[in-house]
Image (cartoon, helix red, strand yellow):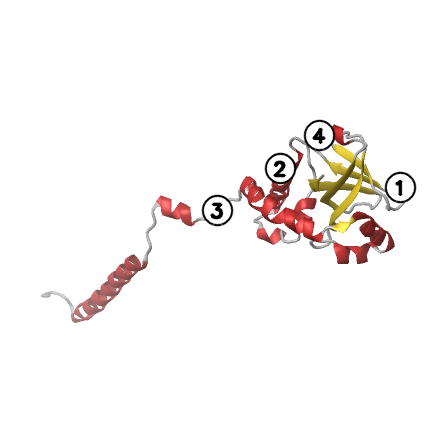
Amino acid sequence: MTGTSPAARRRWPTRWIAAGAVAALVVAMALSTEYRSAESASAAAPKKFDPATFGAQNYEAKVVPAIQKSAVDLPVLLKAITADKDAAGARYGKRQGTSPYNFAVKATGVAGEAKSGLLPVTVDGLPDGTRVSIQIGPAVNGTALRDAAGYITFGQFVNQVEYADAATALNNQMRQKLLTGLDAAGLKGKKIAFTGAFTLLTPATVTITPVAIS
């Protein structure tokens, strides 16, 4: 190191030590880094919500049994709602937050003339002026099946869109499993039994999404 000043010679070991530390850090980072192929990274990513799969997995196996198990006789429920809506909701209904109550119900009655996707049913023992209808498609609206089942919550989904799609998927399953082939016109004047769910908007108008009609 001829021609190098004493101060410069003293800085050389420090530089080599620093360079060695950096090299060791790079090696450690390389050893600890997990490399994934595009295929493995894709497999590890959260699965995209598939409404059709959700409906197929939940409707017959979980939703229908849950609604059948908790179904209340419709005359009993409507009398309770008329007396005290909040008490009836707390006892028989299900809801999230401050949304309307949803009820699982069952009843027997005489079917009327199917019209505009609804089958009116005359049920004895209801408060005067109550109109009861069953959704018979082809369009099936609302979230009653999802919400009355009791075990499906918003927190299970990424966003409101998925939550709404889950309700639609259950309605689609019901339409395929129950309403396909149903001769609604042929039920006019006949006594039928039904089980289903409805969202309470007004006790005078009850629109039921069915899970069973016989």
> In the rendered structure, which disc, 3 or 2, sits on the residue that comes first in sequence?
3
Instruction: Indicate which label's residue lies in the foreground, 3 or 2.
Output: 2
Q: Amino acid at mark 4?
A: Asp
Q: Position of residue 175 (x, y in %)?
A: 65, 36
Q: Name the residue carrying label 4.
A: 183
The answer to whether 196 appears left or right of 51 in the picture is right
Q: Name the residue carrying label 3.
A: 47
Q: Name the residue carrying label 1.
A: 129
Query: Where is 37 relative to 33, above or below?
Result: above
Q: Is residue 95 visible?
A: no
Closer-to-camera residue (168/176): 176
> In the rendered structure, which disc, 1 or 3, sits on the residue that comes first in sequence?
3
Helix, strand or loop under label 2: helix
Helix, strand or loop under label 3: loop
What's the distance in space between the residues labelled 4 and 3, CA to CA? 39 Å
Closer-to-camera residue (214/18): 214
What's the distance in space between the residues labelled 1 and 4, CA to CA? 27 Å
Query: Looking at the rendered structure, which numbered label has been put on residue 177?
Result: 2
Instruction: Indicate which label's residue lies in the foreground, 1 or 4.
Output: 4
Q: Quadrant of residue 20?
A: bottom left
Closer-to-camera residue (60/37): 60
Q: Position of residue 29 (x, y in %)?
A: 30, 59
The answer to whether 83 appears left or right of 154 in the picture is right
Q: Quadrant of residue 113?
A: top right
Asked if disc 1 and disc 4 are in contact, CB closer than 8 Å, the reply is no
Badge 1 density bin: few <14, some 14–19, many ≥20, Cα 10 Å: few
